[in-house]
Every structure is written in structure tokens, then in C-alpha cells.
Image (cartoon, grey):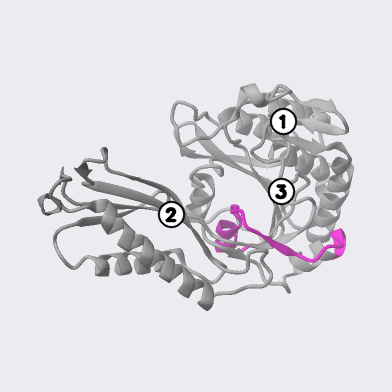
Amino acid sequence: MNKAPALFEMMRQLIETPSVSCVDAAIDQSNQPVIDLLANWLDQLGFETEIMPVSAGKSNLIATLGKGDGGLVLAGHTDTVPYDDDRWQHDPFKLTEADNRLYGLGTSDMKAFLALAIEAAVSFTKDQYKQPLIILATSDEETTMQGAKALVDASRPRARYAIIGEPTGMKPVRMHKGILMEAIRITGLAGHSSNPALGHNALEAMHRVISDLMQWREQLQQQYHDPLFEVPVPTMNFGHIHGGDNPNRICGCCELHIDIRPLPGMSLDNLRSELNRRLQDLFPENHFKLETLPLFSGIPAMETAADSALVQAAEKLTGFSAGSVAFGTEAPYFNQLGMETVVLGPGNIEQAHQPDEYLQLDRVQPTLDLLRQFIHQFCIH
């Protein structure tokens, strides 16, 4: 194989290449420069590289070494969250080594993992690969999951196993909850507050909605329970509410935003249908207009079977039982593609999305050793 840039040089270039994704178009950036960097390195190393356009300025990269119907995917997203520049002590777009840490936006979540995956891959010669190794880089994981969804739509890539290098503290994760975020909007009729008969108060109607949702939450928590999660029940959070404009006006419109975190086995579509059914049943009269609006399409819950060969290998190699996390990843989309998927990376979730994000320097070599063992077991052996 040709020589890749040195590991820390790859990390440096990835961190120095901004790729913030944000629902605010004024902040959102293209990930194409990061994809081009990775594609150039992997192409020189003998990988078959394919850049998959996802949307304007956004792409995925599928880089494959070797042939076969099995193989292993090492995956990471190329985007980062926005940052608060005035809260960083280090330059977010410079890889800074200090205090046995590597600082920079994307060190933990999760550009550095892509450099580690490449470094591990070149530990073996091309002719040693009996099953393919695929290095997969995606777009917009931090916002819309459009990169992962584009892979599902294209039914690619095809592999038997996948490791996503999200920050898990080097402990394997085989389950996580899903995420559903909905807006509930009630439109009534504004009027002078001196006479309630002059209007229909949307804020009072929303009180009825919240009461019903709290009852539904209790029903869901009685019905679904999984002790493998730190919070073993599905949750429902009332995160935002706004209604009316003045105390002497009947509230004409009120909007509530909720967050539901379902357990594996709970369908997002079924939850949405039940939510709509319950809310419509609350208002058989015509005084109010009720609308439910997805704030985004949602992330399904994820579960890979405990007896999966990849899960068992991850447990043996790390010394930790495969666990669960509350945050969402691209793993359910990879599972939809038929891959047994584990989330396992060197960063810590406590550093993700934080000022002065960092990766512990002493995690680098153990992660390389671990990835080499996975590659050997699933691609070389």
C-alpha cells in the first residue's frame, strides 16, 4: 500500500476543515472538503472510493478495500455541531495537544475516529484482505441523518458487520433509545379577556392536552420496561410552550414541543399515529383547530442481538459487556441495511458538544489496537 499521512497529521487536517451542520442555514456548512480529504487519502491507499451526493454541498463516502459478501464497516460522521467560540480556551479548528489530551472540534465526536480507522486499515497489506473493509463517512448526522437515510435508500453499502465510532469511552453499545420530537399546535379564537365568551382559549385547551399526554406517558412506562437502560422506561419531555401575547387577551394560539424517547421495539410511526388519535379525540367540537407537526423525522431505537458475532467479539476484546445509551446514532439505519452494528469509539459523550472538546491521548493506541483486532477477525482471518 502507499503511505497515508501520519495519524496525527490526518487528525490535524480533519479538525482544521470546518464542517458544522446546523438546522440554521446561516451556520450550516458543507462537508465536501472533509469528504474530499478522506477520499484522496483512501484512493491513494488502494481503496475503491465512491462519493455519494446527498444534498447541495453534502456527500457520503464509501471506500472499500477487498472483495466478498461479508466484511466490516468502520463508520463515522463528518459533521460537527456548532460551537461557542467565546467559551473555548483552545482553537476549535486546530488540533492542540495539552494535558494528555487532543483538543479540537470533532476530536471526540467524531472526526478523529475516521483517522484511526484509516491508520488501522493500513496495518495490513491489500492481499491479506479475505473480506472487504469499508470505511464509511456520512453527512448531517448531527441534524437530519440525511447521510444515513441516503445509504438506506441506495441499499448501500453491503457488509455483515459495522462499528460506528461514536464516543462511548471504548465500551461497546448494542442498544439505544429512539428520538421523536413533535410540535402540537392549537388554534382557538382571540378576544377581550373581560368576557370569556368572546373567544376560545387555546392555552386552556393545551392544558387538556398536557394532562392527557401525562396519562399516556404513564401508560407507556407501565407497558414498556428494559432494565438494561439507565432510564429503563420510555420518556416524554415537555420542552417548550408558547401561547398568547397579552394577559388581557384570550389566547388564540398555543404551541407545545415534546420529546419522546422510545425503547427498542417501539415504532416511531405507531407512536405518531397514537399521538394523533389521542389528541383528535380530545377535541370533537369545532371550536379549536389542532395540528401535530414533526420537528424532524425522528431516529428509531436500535438493538443488535446480544448473540451477534460482532457483539460477542466486542465484549471479548474490550472486556466490557455491551450496554445501552440514551443518545441516538446512525446505527438503526445500518441495521436496516442488514448489518449487525455496534457503537464503539474512543471519545467520551461528556466531551461531545462541549467547549474544549477533547480526546484523551492515552486512548489513541488502545483504539488502534482494538480496530486492528476487529479487522483481523472479520476481514483477514
Apparent side of residue 184 relative to residue 355 in the rendered image (left or right):
left
Apparent side of residue 181 relative to residue 286 in the rendered image (left or right):
right
Label located before the other in sequence (3 or 2): 3
Label located before the other in sequence (1 or 2): 2
**Would you name the residue on which mark 3 appears?**
165
**Would you name the residue on which mark 1 appears?**
356
Which residue is rendered at x = 10% and y = 50% of the image? 198
Secondary structure under tag 3 reads loop
**Residue nearest the viewer, comparing 323 with 165:** 323
Amino acid type at image mark 3: Gly
Residue 112 appears in the figure: yes
Q: Which residues are magenta?
A: 316-340
- In the rendered image, residue 128, in percent from the top left (x then y), is placed at 84, 52
Which quadrant of the figure contains the N terminus? Answer: top right
Q: Quadrant of residue 375?
A: bottom right
Which residue is rendered at x = 82% and y = 44% of the image? 120
Amino acid type at image mark 2: Ile
Which residue is rendered at x = 58% and y = 36% of the image? 81
**Residue nearest the viewer, comparing 334 with 107:** 107
Which residue is rendered at x = 75% and y = 65% of the image? 322
**Would you name the residue on which mark 2 appears?**
258
